[in-house]
Amino acid sequence: MAESILTLDQLSVGYTEEPVVVDFSIAIPAGSITTIIGPNGAGKSTLLRAIYGLNRHFGGTVRFRGQAIERLPPKERLRLGIGFVPQGRCNFPLMTVRENLELGAFTLRGKAAEQVIERILAQFPLLQAKLGIMAGNLSGGEQQILETAMVLEASPQLLLLDEPSLGLSPANQDQIFETIARLRDDGLTVLVVEQNAHGALQISDTGIVMELGRLFMVGPAAAVASDPRIKVAYLGGT
């Protein structure tokens, strides 16, 4: 079994006076895709934001490669190797694809920045053909790939994706899932929150189901997808 890159132990997090996610414990294997599904308001996005340090910590631990990070700010978590692509469009729409990639490499200088952009363009050839186009004129799927590429410029070991297929056409959704699977095959660990449970679980190694801020189910993605309760609730089964 692969070593765990991320371990959450009785984690409780939220925004105001009460936690949204309560006593959440899970271990994420390195080099895997783990998909979190659940109803609206289950705490899925809150959990991702907590891993990146964007909400209030009430209790429990977050360990990344064995190091406790729950008290670290987001910039330190990024430095350690955690990348986060939040829900919704998060590029600079009135700037070109190249300019967006240059901003994604803002922590680098000179040749180092150029080298990382070259690496990203080799990884995502479709961006090479769009370098001079305004990011806002890309398709939804292309914008999602651009935003993911910008985060990957920091060379994370763990990538957090919040609803990457939201609002996309079926064809663009397929493109995004293929991209996520390829990133895993290249050695990246991916933790994704996704409303398209069927598409996400098909490419995942592990499935997590959240309800009311708590862990409801965890197991191999195929087993989660075939569970009668999950099929009825999230996969259109009867």
Image (spheres, rainbow, N blue to C red):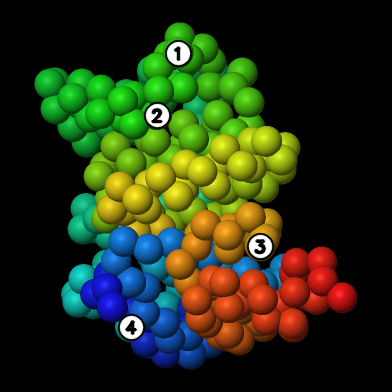
Q: Quadrant of residue 5?
A: bottom left
x and y, in percent, of residue 64 in the image: 26, 70
- Real-space Cα separation, disc 4 to disc 2, in angstroms: 35 Å
Question: Between residues 163 and 93, which one lies in front from this camera angle?
Answer: 163
x and y, in percent, of residue 28 in the image: 37, 73
**Front: mark 4 or 2:** 2
Q: Which mark is residue 197?
A: 3
Q: Amino acid at mark 2?
A: Phe
Residue lying at 25% horizontally and 44% vertically, measured from the top left: 155
Quadrant containing the N terminus is: bottom left
Disc on the earlier residue, 2 or 1: 2
At mark 3, the secondary structure is: helix
Residue lying at 63% horizontally and 26% vertically, measured from the top left: 139
Q: Residues within 10 Å of mark 1 (few under 14, many from 20)?
A: few
Q: Which mark is residue 124?
A: 2
Q: Residues within 10 Å of mark 4 (few under 14, many from 20)?
A: many
